[in-house]
Amino acid sequence: MEGLRKRCCWLTLGAVLVFIGAACQVPNGDLESSTTGAQSEAIAPDYTTTKTTILQSVTTTSSLSSSTATGISDIGWTAALLNGLAVADASAPVSYYRDDWGSGWSDADRDCMNTRHEVLKEESLSPAQTDTSECKVVQGRWYAAFTGTWVTDPSELDIDHFVPLANAHISGGWAWPSDKKRAFYNDLADPRHLIAVTASANRSKGSRGPESWKPNDVSYWCVYAHSWASIKSRWELTVTTPELAALTSMLSTCTSEPASTWTPPPAPAFVSASTTIQPTTIASATNPGNTKNCSDFSSYSEAKAWFDRYFPDFGDVAKLDGDNDGEPCESLPGGP
């Protein structure tokens, strides 16, 4: 019996050492140098302390969950997800330009419905209604997860890059070729990559990571962190030390691993998915092109109204949002 106890102890110690060794491994993926002509060093992951911190956090969570039937399996997926992320706190060696990632939503399958409207159609919890051309969604029922609210008017919604373009840039995307950047911009293969959220929540989030912005709906934190980490892992993007700490904290709210396709809570009676929606004829917006300057508007609110009208379909076509924060012509009277 004493020999068996010693054998178990050595096996346990060996498993711990293997687990710690795995945590120190870095996902493969070379970052190419900038195409500006100058030699640039790739961002080198810095994981001298963060992996240890995560393992300690996961271990603590494991002890708290040990009384539940799902505790062991839950900690297994959490540790695997977090340890699959490379940590790098260095800044990107080249500046971010939104136009490098695409000038707007594409229509990859050439069915006249661009990426924005494909997402709206897919995420509507009742049959989505389109305009007369059947190219644009004009009515439906959506659950805006960031705010925990129900929406029926698609003009109130933005299609959010779950991991913002600017964040992807500094996380390694700066080294990608143009076609990969555009693929990231319009990715419909992963249902977590692009989601419909309220315009106000999208503008509030901007390009910030979970270390500095979290959804108002705390019940969504588990899904949010899981989606964020999964997307970063899929595209081999790095995370910063504070970002990793935030993800660890948010994942501690999980009771089980979220599915890749999230199911919203049941709709209240007044927005029941069974409610019949009469088709509505709404004229499609026309791309205005680069026809406006900030000097053409008398106030920020006027510029914002124009910007919000065309941005969902065509992006910042008039180049009114110089810092890509979703706020055009901020120097005008009434600006933020």
Image (cartoon, rainbow, N blue to C red):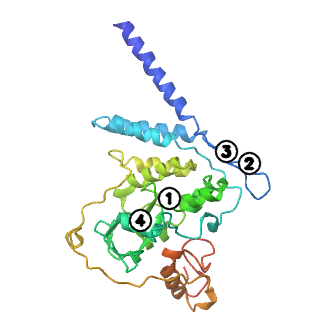
Percent of width and height locating residue 323: 62, 72
Task: Report, in whole angstroms, how far the alpha carbon at label 2 lies from the one at label 1.
Answer: 28 Å
Q: How crowded is the residue under tag 2: few (<14 C-alpha within 10 Å), some, or many (20+)?
A: few
User: Does dot 1 land on a helix, a strand or a loop?
Assistant: loop
Residue type highlighted by circle 2? Glu
User: Does dot 4 land on a helix, a strand or a loop?
Assistant: helix
**Relative to 231, is 313 above or below?**
below
User: Does dot 3 land on a helix, a strand or a loop?
Assistant: loop
Q: How crowded is the residue under tag 4: few (<14 C-alpha within 10 Å), some, or many (20+)?
A: some
**Relative to 30, is 35 above or below?**
below
Q: Residue at x 39, y 7 (%)?
A: 3
Percent of width and height locating residue 58: 43, 39
Work out whether mark 1 precedes mark 3 in sequence or the reverse, and give the earlier one: 3
The answer to whether the residues at label 3 and label 2 have Cβ atoms under 8 Å apart is: yes
Q: Nearer the viewer, residue 119 or 143?
A: 119
**Residue bearing the label numbered 2:** 41
Task: Report, in whole angstroms, how far the alpha carbon at label 3 lies from the one at label 2.
Answer: 8 Å
Residue extending farthest front: 110
Residue type highlighted by circle 1? Asp
Work out whether mark 4 precedes mark 2 in sequence or the reverse, and give the earlier one: 2
**Residue bearing the label numbered 1:** 187
Work out whether mark 1 precedes mark 4 in sequence or the reverse, and give the earlier one: 4
Q: Residue at x 64, y 59 (%)?
A: 178
Residue 125 sits in quarter: bottom left
**Residue bearing the label numbered 3:** 44
Task: Report, in whole angstroms, how far the alpha carbon at label 1 lies from the one at label 3.
Answer: 27 Å
Q: Nearer the viewer, residue 199 or 290?
A: 290
Task: Report, in whole angstroms, how far the alpha carbon at label 1 lies from the one at label 4.
Answer: 10 Å
Q: How crowded is the residue under tag 3: few (<14 C-alpha within 10 Å), some, or many (20+)?
A: some
Which mark is in front, 2 or 1?
1
Residue type highlighted by circle 4? Val
**Residue bearing the label numbered 4:** 119
